[in-house]
Amino acid sequence: MNCPTCGNAMVTLELADIEIDHCVHCGGIWLDSGELEFLMDNPQKARHLLDSFQEAPAAAEPPRRCPICGKKMAKIRVGTAKPPLLIDRCRRTDGLWLDRSELQEVLKRGEADKDNRIWGLLADMFGQSGRV
């Protein structure tokens, strides 16, 4: 699978039962549909976070193409906190694209990783600290 941001091939890393596609060039992460919820490991918080996603039609960022279906993805605003956080979501619900460090911010805004357990696993997985 190629990165929707820079076009380089992504590597697939496995964490528990989740396969995370990661671009080592730009640091982006692709999560297939349902993987964010599985990562959060708390259905109530996951549902609350997903319900906060609102399409941002006037986003300044150019649209990216889904690495699975090839269609333009929607820009999604996560939560209501300032400054706004925009991520990319496949309109066909194939998954989510998160630029470098956006996954950490999504988890923070969803109050899903207060003890940094998920972030620690991801940092170990990617062999980095604070750069995923």
Image (cartoon, rainbow, N blue to C red):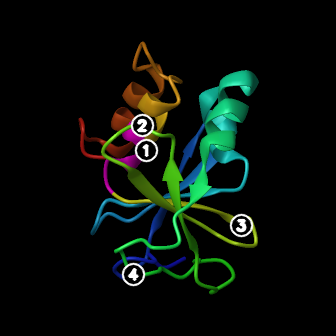
Residue at 62% in and 86% down: 70
User: Going from the N terminus, do you reach mark 1 or mark 2 first?
Assistant: 1
Crowding around mark 2 (Cα neighbors within 10 Å: few <14, some 14 to 19, many 20+) is many
SS under mark 2: helix
Pick whichever, 125 or 70, lies toward us. Answer: 70
Q: Nearer the viewer, residue 83 or 111?
A: 83
Image marks 4 and 3: residues in contact by CB distance under 8 Å: no
Q: What residue span does the magenta drawing correspond to?
A: 100-105
* First of labels 4, 3 by sequence position: 4
Lower sequence index among marks 4 and 1: 4
| Mark with earlier residue (1, 3) | 3
Q: Are marks 1 and 2 in contact (CB under 8 Å)?
A: yes
Mark linked to residue 127: none
Q: What residue is shown with label 4?
A: 62
Q: Nearer the viewer, mark 3 or mark 2?
A: 3
- In whole angstroms, how far apart are the C-alphas of marks 1 and 2? 10 Å
Amino acid type, mark 4: Pro
> Vertically, is 119 above or below 57?
above
Task: Give the mark, 3 or 2, whose residue is nearer the N terminus.
Answer: 3
Q: CA distance from mark 1 to mark 3?
A: 17 Å
* Residue 24 coordinates in the image, percent (x, y): 31, 63
Residue at numbered disc 2: 122
Camera-side mark, 4 or 2: 4
